[in-house]
Image (cartoon, rainbow, N blue to C red):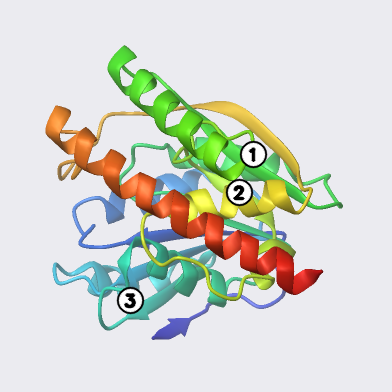
Amino acid sequence: MTSETTKEGAPFCSIVIPCYNEAANLPALLGAFAGALKSADIELVVVDNGSSDGTGEILRRESSRLPFLRAVYCPVNLGYGGGILAGLAAARGRLAGWAHGDLQYAPADIVAAAESLRSWREKVFFKGLRANRSPADIFFTAGMGLFASLALRLPLRDVNAQPTFFSRELFEGWTDPPRDFSLDLYAYADALRRGYAVLRRPVPLERRLHGNSTWNRGLSDRLRLSLRMAGAVLRIRGKLGAAGRAND
């Protein structure tokens, strides 16, 4: 894994965007961030997570002209959580976090969420709440949130909403975080367990411009995801329990 930087000094916030074969979205994504970023102390850390479609080439070209952009290159795909963790390892901000690179979350909304945390000095955790969703998606998400809440004994809802931001002390304390889709749940649950101030606010969810969802294609996909989520919740319960015992 390699990283490149074009800006000196520690920023206020690092926004990590994991990208796997997002070449079709990347020019519009970077252009939208260029228009949204008004502060010089926010960095965008884009991770090429083992892409094979030219994502890395676009990042190399754009890094030379966009001062806010840092690029991290992973030669092989590390999974959803692994790509995010690679970006967090390169992040330098007092706050850090992530959002998706498929333009379902507008860069202006992602930046606005980060800016809303500028005055916070204590430990804080921010996660959006997905707006503009169908009743079926809302019901499914509520059911998964209820199961996770009961299993982990924590008040969890809309676990996979974006963007996600937090004080960097949160991830600096992780020893064995998951490297798959359950990293969102792990971060959220760990913040609650450690007494972080948790902030939520609606963030519009737009239609995907390129590519297709790998889970939201029908009832069978939702059932498969439910089983995966149940297993992830149980694994995370073990991880958080072990972390709590280690800190006692």
Mark 3 → mark 1, Cα distance in angstroms: 42 Å
Amino acid residing under circle 1: Leu
Q: Is residue 146 above or below residue 82?
A: above
**The C terminus - image quarter:** bottom right
State the image quarter where residue 247 is shown: bottom right
Residue bearing the label numbered 3? 60
Secondary structure state at the residue bearing disc 2: helix
Left or right: 81, with 123 as reference point: left
Residue sitting at 86 percent across and 52 percent down?
Answer: 121
Left or right: 244, with 182 as reference point: right
**The N terminus - image quarter:** bottom left
Secondary structure state at the residue bearing disc 3: helix
User: Callout 1: 10 Å neighbours few (<14), some, many (20+)?
Assistant: some
Q: Residue 178, image x and y in percent? A: 45, 65
In this rendering, which labeled residue sits more in front, label 2 or label 1? 1
Q: Residue 165, image x and y in percent? A: 62, 50
Residue bearing the label numbered 2? 189
Q: Earlier in the sequence, mark 2 or mark 1?
A: 1
Residue sitting at 57 percent across and 56 percent down?
Answer: 97
Residue bearing the label numbered 1? 154
Q: Residue 184, image x and y in percent? A: 48, 51
